Amino acid sequence: MLKYKPTIGLEVHIQLSTRSKVFCADKNEYGSAANTNISEISLAHPGTLPVLNKTAIEHAIKMGFVCKSSISQEMFFDRKNYFYPDLPKGYQLTQDKTPICVGGEIQIRDGMGKFKTIKLTKIHLEEDAGKLIHEQTSSFSMVDFNRAGVPLIELVTEPVIENDEDAVSLLIELRKIVRYLGISDGDMEKGSLRCDANVSIAPLGLKELGKKVEVKNMNSFRHVQKAIQYEIKRQGSILEKGNEVISETRLYDVDSGETYDMRTKEELNDYRYFPEPDLCPFYISQEWLDQIRKQIPILPSQYIEKFIHQYAIAENDALTLTESRELAQFFDQVCEKSGNYKAAVNWLIGPCKSYLNEMNCEINETNLTVDRLTALIEIVDQNRVSFSVASSEILPHLFSDKTANPLDLGIKLNLLIDESIDQIENFVEELIKKYPEKVAAYKNGKKGLLGMFMGELMKETGGKIDPKKASETIKAALES
Amino acid sequence: MHYRSLSQVRNDLDNGSLTLPELVRHYLRNIEENAHLNAFLSVYGDSALEHSEKIQTKLLKGNAGRLAGLVLGIKDVLCIKDRPLQASSRILDSFHSQFTATAIQRLIDEDAIIIGRLNCDEFAMGSSNENSAFGPVLNPLDNNRVPGGSSGGSAAAVASDCCLAALGTDTGGSVRQPAAFCDIIGLKPTYSRISRYGLASYASSFDIIGILSKSVEDAALLLEIMTGYDEMDSTSSNEPVLRYAELAGNHEKLKIGMLNYSGDEGIDPDILQYMRSISSELKELGHVVEEIDFPELEYALPTYYILTTAEASTNLSRYDGVRYGHRSTNGHDLESMYKKSRSEGFGEEVRRRILLGTFVLSANYYDAYYTKAQKVRRFLQDKTRSLFDKYDFVILPTTPTPPFKFGENATPLQMFLADLFTVLASVAGIPAISLPLGKTSEGLPVGVQVMSDAFTEDKLLSFSNYLMQETLTSKA
């Protein structure tokens, strides 16, 4: 059925979250009022010179370590020359000849959950450009230079990605890594993670790659996926007609979901790269490299490994728990404190995760602490409160209230299991009488009705009973 | 009143025969009387007078800086906060700098007074000061002749006693050559010795601030104060700053190389004659003087022009009419705005060098020109630096000819040849000084250029001082 094999390579730009810009002290801050984070250096006034930001170097090297790249210890910057109003110096400082990280790889899981290794060509450091703003009501173009000089790493993969799904998996993995490393917020909507895709297709069985088309202007994972899908289809139909694909740059159009020809002379551009004479070649000592390596936090793959082997967590749960560094760390600490790994998973993947999703925040941005979740697990374990009551009545307070202690809350809200309710049997008897048809249905095999009886019982008792004991009692009554 | 050094000024200030405001007024009068030279683009009379009064008070209190009494002119490629900066170009019409160059700030902090902005070749590109958007500067010694370039205004201002000293910039001879043409001292320090922050770049790997003065001691003092690492210029050197101003040195039995250039055509016979006479004079003084054949010199000029134009072509890309300076009103879209703004804003020589530089960096010619020139530069650097394994100093003329008349060097190639002897120190990145020692038979000034090894300005300056005192400058 498939006649063509697509090959995709990605060029991913990631803004580094440093305090200042990569070549001057101006603030690197998203969302500031236009043209407020600019000095004469950002604006390329005559007489200004760049000075390299060491944190940006460290961030790039951390990325390289995680990707198992080899780190260049000697490097220099190059000028990429072109004119555009958002480019104050008339050239961009980048690393054409000596990228800070060479080679490397990233592991992803494909749609079937199978591991795949994506080889990297390089990761290099460069500066971002400003931003052009076109207002429909004005015949002028405006330019905001706040972004000019924000540090970027550009990560380039080999042309080895086989389909749109893998491309998106790679981006998600990249976002996860930069967030774990704390080197970028990896937010595509804000433009801190941007992706261009080089897409080509070739007849199956052919070793050579087809003509490459560069697709730009995708602002979300979904756009990347749709743009690649569209491009594969478009190139397929060109080859079907016996025509040739033109090597060009195309833009993705969000509204139509199609790509279109940029119609610029960009292809003819000669960037006249040459070594930046305003910066000395840069040397990274072994000591510095060792220091940077020590700053690398526990990574998702290491957490997954630990969760599966040490805490005996299912792989899927481990994946969910490591989606963010904050959650993984939190889970790890709860496990260490409470020892009840299974409960920790249930709490975090269940009620905690739904709360976080609903609030669209990370766990460290809430008031829930490791200690208090551990305490909550403990009182559930001790049968002092039921899981369902704890999660529906106590947990919300732990998220919203800074000091509330689970046991105190249980007492204050009158939620603790009342040991004195030993007349569960009485309640059960009432229920059996109330629903004779359901009892008959149960006896005929509709075992699922147990849940209905449990629900009713909980309602009657205000949840203050031990659910395990309750379920046993109902079962005994139904089956007698 | 014609002071030749800051120590003379200080002497009179200290004994009360002169006040600093008087001195500033003297210079302001001279500036006015010499307005025809076209050396000054701006005169900061009011602020200079105001500062002079404050510094006079400090002098009386005994807490004045080391440069109190020094009145200084600044070439129009160096930034001073809230002052116009145009690099003598229309492209920077109405531009004012928003900061002060590090080197200038260090001088101001020591109570130097800045009296004005000095004309130069546009973006420091030229050897005659004929490439200024504000018109040429005249040589104060002979108004029919050029003052040299690119720091022509700086040289003319010092020579005509409009200020005691001036800052210029030297990329391939732009301080030394005009100093020679105007019969004053011009010092180009080792590349990276002074911060370039606040110097509008021409060619980043060559540019360096230089000093034009009437005495070696002033050049040494200004250098000492400007020198030193600057965190705003990561290419600035952190070699220790030496006490240049002490001019201490042993001048017994030095080994001196006289650099010969085999391609002698085009070199003024009077200059060759003067070089021979200084050579024998040095021998008489007990030094070992040897002639050095240096055929490699012929590669210095092409290397210099390939690399400087390459760097200039991209250094000047920022002048695009978008954020500041001249924007053409004739543009109808982005591309024509760029083209028209830059074509209107840049003069002919600047346009020529941008085109040359763009060409040598273009993909098809990059290796043939840029890469090769880098290799030759390294070769010349090694070759030149190795001279100092054998010699304490190397001496050669500053210029192949005395100051020429306006329009005399009609073609760009002829003009480029004016830099023949100065580009070597620039390509090698070593310090060099032009000393006003000789005269031609016509009475025109002859500059003698002394070079020494990188970061040995202390030795170079003390030897220069010795030469100025020991040799009879009007001997030839």
Image (spheres, coloured by chain):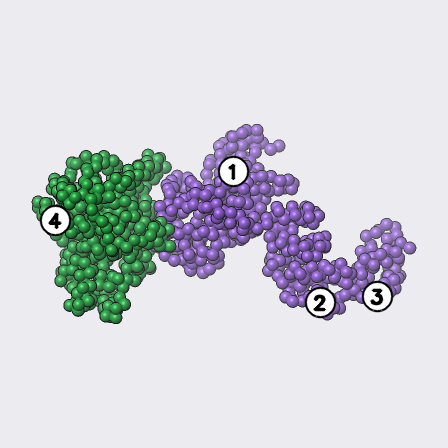
* Helix, strand or loop for disc 3: loop
Alpha carbons under labels 3 and 1: distance apart:
67 Å
Q: Residues within 10 Å of mark 4 (few under 14, many from 20)?
A: few
**Helix, strand or loop at disc 4?**
loop
Q: Which numbered mark, 4 or 1, is in the foreground of this view?
A: 4
Tag 3 near tag 2, CB within 8 Å: no
Name the colour assigned to chain B in the rendering: green
Q: Say above or below: A230 vs B196.
A: above
Q: Position of residue A5 (x, y in %)?
A: 56, 34
Q: Which subunit holds the residue at mark 4? A: B
Residue type at mark 3 is: Ile
Q: How many marks?
A: 4
* First in residue order: circle 2 vs circle 1: 1
Q: Which residue is mark 3?
A: A421
Q: Nearer the viewer, residue B315 or A339?
A: A339
In three-dimensional space, the C-alpha distance between marks 4 and 1, rounded to whole angstroms, equals 72 Å
Left/right placement of residue A473 relative to residue B58 reads right
Q: Are marks 3 and 1 on the same chain?
A: yes
Q: Position of residue B197 (x, y in %)?
A: 33, 54
Residue at mark 2: A409
- Secondary-structure class at tag 2: helix
Tag 4 residue = B472
Q: Give the amino acid at mark 2.
A: Leu
Asked if marks 4 and 1 fall on the same chain, the answer is no
- The first of marks 3 and 1 along the sequence is 1
Q: Chain of mark 2?
A: A
The subunit carrying tag 1 is: A
Q: To which residue does mark 1 refer?
A: A158
Mark closer to the chain start, 3 or 2: 2
